[in-house]
Amino acid sequence: MKITDIKTYIVSPIPGSPWVFVEVETDEGITGLGECTDYRSGPMLVAGIEAVKAMVVGEDPAHIEEIWQRIFRQYSSLSGRGFISHLISGIDIALWDIRGQVLGQPIYKLLGGPVRDRVPLYTHIQDQWYDGVTIDDAVAAAKQTLADGHDAIKTDPFKWQRSLTGEFTGADRVEYLSPRAIGEAIDWMDAVREAVGPETELMVDAHGRFDVASAIAAGRALEHVNLIWYEEPVPPESFKALRQVRESTDIPICMGERHFTRYDYVPMLEERLVDFIMPDISWTGGISEMMRIASLAEPFYVRISPHDALGPVSIMAGFHCSMTIPNFYRLECLHTRFPDFAKIMDPMFEYEGKWINPTDRPGLGVALNHETFDEFLVDPASEHARAFR
């Protein structure tokens, strides 16, 4: 069997939320499906896949590791961690999908078999930085999420700064949190905790945007909420900054969505800077690298919770890994987007409440529905293709 082509699609059944899918085609009619969605980089990713295609077409799709290493090492001068590992992710997931289809087995059985009978999820409610969202909105969403069958919830309770044009800056700068902003965040989390009760697992996401003093002050103020973790309290580039937060707060730390490949995780683990890690399977190097990172974390007794707030292929790739990883916590999702996933998938993955259930369908067990998703295709040159949020 040989790879004959690689195709990319930007698809958006939700306005403002384009997903980047990769299909690897073979000369025996088997097509593998992958995803490398990033928040704002769809056109760059499409161009990147096109650039590496020549390195992959004509190869045996069973040579997953050789193809992974070839792309990673070929672009070492650009650093394989980041943009290049995004490209590898989309292709790697698709190659594992092909492998499963060839062997007639779901991917999780090829990764060593299940260590659990289904995969638990955590999900999101609104974040405070969304314009006009109130504490009452967050409380109502939290109660509805419990009614939907979930018992683990994440939110960002911190307001984001605005630029001079009045737009939210997002992670465009390192922010300072005023005492007032911290107070508003605590009011948010106290209200959510009261709404969901003491047994519901809560997580706070700071989106990696605070200076050290702000991250420490916010972390200390959050300690009474009894969080599972405090996520990305500082930007991902400085482990010394992370150490300051780690040593100055009594709250579990989660990092990793913007750390790429096993090499970025070594210092976090060896220096005991984190309690949880959250690599993104569409960014860090696909299924192959997710499994290596999980194994790297296991002897440190650090749990892995794959980041996934993106598309349906990403969550299914994470699901297959999560079925087999011993040191697993939960798989991230936006459960309110599952109906939108179903608009472009055939078949759709099987889920109920907080669980995704395994099937015996080979490979990923899901596929794009080419009869319906044409209406959601996005031109890579459009502004819509660049804006995930």
Image (tube, rainbow, N blue to C red):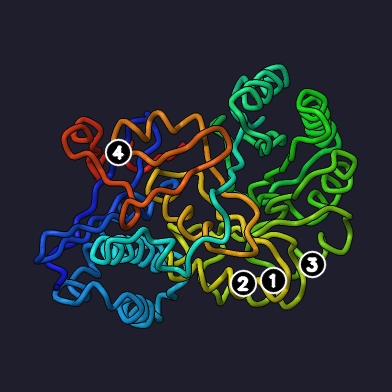
**Residue depth check, mark 3 versus mark 4: number of the one nearer the observer:** 4
**Residue depth check, mark 4 versus mark 2: number of the one nearer the observer:** 4
Which of these two is toward me, 373 or 295?
Answer: 295
Task: State the separation of the CA atoms marked 4 and 2.
Answer: 33 Å
Q: Residues within 10 Å of mark 1 (few under 14, many from 20)?
A: some
Q: Which mark is residue 345?
A: 4
- The kind of residue on which mark 3 rests is Arg
* Residue at screen point 88% across, 45% down: 223
Q: Find numbered disc 3 in the image and state the secondary structure of the residue it sits on.
A: helix
Mark 2 in CB contact with mark 1 (< 8 angstroms): yes
Image coords of residue 271 (percent x, y): 76, 75
Q: Earlier in the sequence, mark 3 or mark 2?
A: 3
Q: Which mark is residue 268?
A: 1
Mark 3 in CB contact with mark 1 (< 8 angstroms): no
* Residue at screen point 14% across, 73% down: 1
Residue 25 figure quarter: bottom left
Q: Earlier in the sequence, mark 3 or mark 1?
A: 3
Using the image, determine if residue 29 lies above or below residue 191.
below
- The kind of residue on which mark 4 rests is Met
Task: State the separation of the CA atoms marked 3 and 2.
Answer: 14 Å
Q: Find numbered disc 4 in the image and state the secondary structure of the residue it sits on.
A: loop
* Residue at screen point 37% across, 82% down: 73
Q: Which residue is mark 3?
A: 243
